[in-house]
Amino acid sequence: MGIDPSGDVIVVGGGVIGLTTAVVLAESGRRVRVWTREPAERTTSAVAGALWWPHLIRPKALARHWALQSLSVYEELAARPEETGVRMVEGVLGESRLDEQGSWAAARVPGMRASTAEEYAGTGLWARLPLLDMPVHLRWLRERFLRADGAVEVRLVTDLAEVAAPVVVNCTGLGARELVPDKAVRPVRGQLVIVENPGVTTWLASTDSDTGASTYFFPHADRLVLGGTADEDNWSLTPDPEVAAEIVKRCAALRPEIAEARVLGHRVGLRPVRDTVRLEREPLPDGRVLVHNYGHGGAGVTVAWGCAREAAALASR
């Protein structure tokens, strides 16, 4: 198989991991193309609630490292929220204590403290964290990539061996299950309800200690994103009306004004969960290099920039 001379890196996958990786590679001087099965606005990333926080991602030490690199980038991008889709927003992490987070949290997240009874009825942490408007952010990533002379092609890849470039970066998320193949990647279904924002300005993320049900709401100027679910090995992309009603009910129990908010739409996404993120270099027999960067679950936004930098370094060795 001949190597395509028109570009030296092809990134397969156009979600937040793929686009961020492509940006880092292109801005380092590499010639980069992104091959994506569907436009960014139709990827799982576009559905994400998109609050930065290193949660349920392993290996923990590396994930924290990647997350803190990403935090620094988002803090800079938050200076231009209308352009980048990134804002620093205050809210409560329910069922969390500062002494459980490790020294990094208090040192790196300014103003993190125990929440008051007025802010949250249970034990929680008040924090100011990046919150991303994903359609805006994905559009900004794509435009930044194109300004770095990158190119995006909508095309289906059924075999990584068919991707004729000296360096291929696999950012296919759940697609890696069949494409690698890697059966360790599995879907965890998340359902969201989008409502008109009734004036909520802070976010909240809570987990019921008895049922394990996750409840969260994330405010944007024109809408409020309500969640959520975590249905393992569920491939359905069809919103369930009963689940949607339960999500609204749980959120309204925390903020009563949500009960009367007009529903604007429903979203479903499949998180590409793996026991540990796969971020590694694989030399191929024909001399090409394959770099894997997938398995981030629901924390893709949280670790995107840290993982992108490591993937770019692996691609350049």
Image: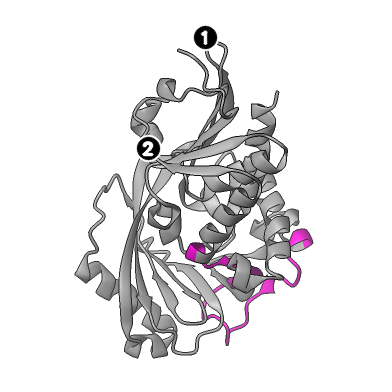
Please, what is the three-letter code of the amino acid marked with disc 2?
Gly
Left or right of 209 in this view: 317? right
Would you say residue 55 is visible in this rendering?
A: no
Q: Between 201 and 285, which is closer to the camera in this rendering?
A: 285
Residue placed at 26% from the left, 47% from the top? 235
Q: For the N terminus, give its image quadrant.
A: top left
| Local crowd size for mark 2, using a 10 Å CA cut-off: few (<14), some (14–19), many (≥20) | many
Residue located farthest toward the front when viewing the structure as drawn: 6
Q: Position of residue 43 (x, y in %)?
A: 40, 52
Residue placed at 41% from the left, 44% from the top? 272
Q: Position of residue 67 (x, y in %)?
A: 65, 50
Question: How are the residues colored?
Answer: one colour
Which dot marks residue 285? Answer: 1
Spatial separation of the CA atoms under disc 1 and disc 2: 23 Å
Q: For the C terminus, give its image quadrant.
A: top right
Question: What kind of element bears circle 1?
Answer: loop
Residue placed at 66% from the left, 28% from the top? 314
Is 164 a magenta residue?
no
Would you say residue 283 is visible in this rendering?
A: yes
Rendering quarter of residue 52 = bottom right
User: Dot 2 corresponds to which residue?
Assistant: 175
Is 125 a magenta residue?
yes
Which dot marks residue 29? Answer: none
Residue located farthest toward the right when viewing the structure as drawn: 107
| Local crowd size for mark 1, using a 10 Å CA cut-off: few (<14), some (14–19), many (≥20) | few
What range is drawn magenta here?
A: 107-135
Left or right of 111 in this view: 273? left
Q: Is residue 191 above or below residue 125?
A: above
Q: Position of residue 281 (x, y in %)?
A: 59, 24
Mark closer to the chain start, 1 or 2: 2
